[in-house]
Amino acid sequence: MSDFQTARLALGARLRELRADAGLSGKAFAMSLGWPASKVSKIETGKQTPTLDDMRAWAEGVGAPEVLDELVGRLRTLETQYGAWRRQLAAGVRARQEAWHATENASTEVRNFEAAVIPGLLQTAEYARHMFLRTTALHRTAQDIEEGVNARMQRQMALYTPGRQFHFLLWEPALHMLVCPRDVMAGQLDRLAGVFGMSTVQLGIVPLGAELSVVPTHGFWLFDDHLVMAETIGAELRLTDPAELILYRRVWDELADVAITDHEAHRLIGRARAALHKLM
């Protein structure tokens, strides 16, 4: 069970305790709030994440407004672990990039695996622009695209900071995934080939045809040994549970074992670039 789900179950148990202490059945409590009975049940059993308004209504409904600060604190803890993209991007792309920058700066060693796209810290401005266009269109959020691109480029300055280490693993299909025009992808592949030789950067590519002992279902980041960030279509997860950290590090190590590096990886990028040129 993830630390997010554990925290959600704990919150549900606390809410159930407050309701029971007030002498209210689930059905009666739901009726008093104008909610369907199923909503109370789902929240209490950890199947639904309550909103801030739900917390306010719950505290008032059980006659204990003094517990609101506690409940809000528990909810905020959940939100730091599970951040829906629509909510995170509401403040704009730039704000999200600046949040990433703060997280990266708190770490000395960063590992990033990507299955379908080029890692953000290795993207060209043009590639990043098309990524942001697609993300904001999908989630129908604020479109401060140029500010976001500039913020991502600023993040990349970390790659030139002595004492930092960045390890990137890329699944080969990401070299061919056209989330941008072909000429933009060509420039992106040239940029990717240029990172070899950087003292702070290591790049490995997991080739098609490699025998895998794990299934790379999504991209993820490892920040030192204290935080994992994983991205799904709908949300960003921040995981700090020791068991999950060990699990993601194990997946990283398994992928790194079959990845090719240095000249072999450079040649693979070159072949992708040549194949792209034939299509242009």
Image: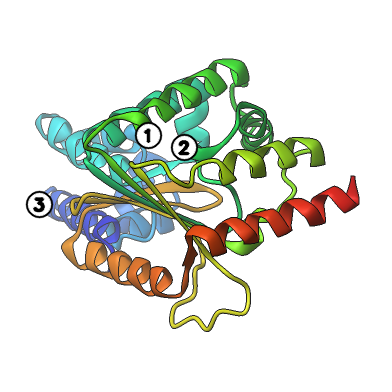
Q: Nearer the viewer, residue 196 or 71?
A: 196
Q: Amino acid at mark 2?
A: Leu
Q: Nearer the viewer, residue 276 or 16?
A: 276
Quadrant of the rendered image containing residue 78: top left
Q: Kindly state the secondary structure of the residue where label 3 is placed.
A: helix
22 to 45, vertically: above or below? above
To which residue does mark 2 refer? 121
Q: Amino acid at mark 1?
A: Leu
Task: Give the quarter of the figure containing the N terminus.
Answer: bottom left
Horizontal side of 226 relative to 219 (left or right) equals left
Horizontal side of 258 relative to 55 (left or right) equals right
Please say whether residue 70 is visible from this viewpoint. Answer: yes
Which x, y percent locates residue 95?
A: 43, 21
Q: Upstream in the sequence, badge 3 or badge 2? A: 3
Disc 3 to disc 2, C-alpha distance: 51 Å
Residue at horizontal 51 percent and vertical 45 percent from the top: 119
Which x, y percent locates residue 212?
A: 49, 81
Q: Nearer the viewer, residue 84 or 146?
A: 146
**Dot 2: within a 10 Å radius of its alpha carbon, few (fewer than 14), some, or many (20 or more) residues?**
some
Residue at horizontal 29 percent and vertical 28 percent from the top: 102
To which residue does mark 3 refer? 21
246 to 21, vertically: above or below? below
Which x, y percent locates residue 270?
A: 68, 54
To which residue does mark 1 refer? 159
